[in-house]
Each structure stands twice: as C-alpha cells, then as structure tokens.
Image (spheres, helix red, strand yellow):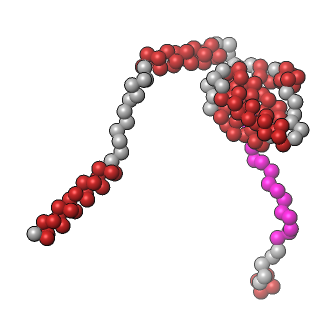
Amino acid sequence: MNQLIAGGAAFVLVLVLWGLGRRPSKTILRSTDAGMVAAINRAQLGLVDSGLDNGAPSPEPMADAADVQQVWQRPSSEAQAIALRKRLRDSFNQGHPDERLEAIQIAFEWGHRSCVSLFRRGLRDADARIVQLSAAAIERHRAGHSPAAAQPVRPPRNVARMR
C-alpha cells in the first residue's frame, strides 16, 4: 500500500513539474490586422525605393550642418548636456525621419561619447541618410583612446634570479 502511495505522489509530482516547464504557446494578437501590416510594409518599401531612384545617395545631411549650427549651441554646463541628451533621445524616438536626421546631425556636431548609443540606433534605421550620417559620426569614436599608465610598470620581484 505504501508503495502505491509513493508511486502516485511521484507521478503527480512529475505531472506538475512537466506542466510548469512547458512554455505557453504564442498566440496571435486579435488586434493585429494583416492588411494594416501589409500597408505599412508597402509604404516603407515605397520610401526605400524613392531613395534609391536617384542613384548614389548624395551627401545632403552634411550640407545642412550649417543650418543646424544656427539653431544648436554646444552645452556649457552638465545640466545643459543632460537636457541636450534627453532632447536628442526624444527627437530620435519620434516617428518622423526628418526629426531623427536632425537629432543625428546635432549629435554629430556635438561629438560627445554619450551619443554613441544614438549613432548605433541610427545605423539600424530604415532611412539611408540617417544610416550614412550615423556611420560617419561613429567613425570618430572607433578605437577610442586608452588612458596612459599612471606609473611605469615594475619588473617582477624575482627579476634578479632570471638572469
């Protein structure tokens, strides 16, 4: 009788553990409309196709840097730098490509290390202008400088015995 109870308890334990270990099946959202998704995809393809029609992309974002210079000023304090980072992040998160491009241009002009994450996001953007400007901007920050050693490195303590 004891063996039957122990076997039943083990069986119930196996069923509970097996049930907890299973991953829930992915359910398709009811709010997802395939027609709406297809329309968005067609609109994005239309934007990409219109950008590729003129051949090689022109260096247009760099030409607008003088216009950005008039509106944007380099931050002079840490509080202004924090506010600028927040404004750049917020304008990049907006859906409009021109706002994202302006944010990347301002970050490119600023050239601060805190903008590298913004440039990395720009590399994955759908707009080719943003990708080109982000690639040019992130090139500055590749292979960043390493601080020099504060003291020369001492030889090992047993260097006299090595000779």
Residue 7 vertical position relative to residue 49 in the rendered view, above or below: below
Q: Within the image, what quadrant is residue 140 found in?
A: top right
Residue at the left extreme of this rendering? 1
At a point 83% along the width and 37% down the height, the residue shown is 80
Query: Magenta span: helix, strand or loop, mainly?
Result: loop
At a point 43% along the width and 23% down the height, the residue shown is 32
Is 144 or 40 nearer to us in this picture? 40
Residue 86 vertical position relative to residue 152 in the rendered view, above or below: above
Q: Within the image, what quadrant is residue 13 found in?
A: bottom left
Residue 112 in view:
yes
Q: Position of residue 60 (x, y in %)?
A: 77, 19
Magenta segment range? Answer: 134-153
Q: Is residue 139 magenta?
A: yes
Q: Is residue 142 magenta?
A: yes
Image quadrant holding the C terminus, namely bottom right
At a point 20% along the width and 59% down the height, the residue shown is 11
Is 77 or 118 nearer to us in this picture? 77
- Classify residue 34 as left or right of residue 96: left
Residue 131 in view:
no
Image label count: 0
Q: Position of residue 10 (x, y in %)?
A: 22, 62
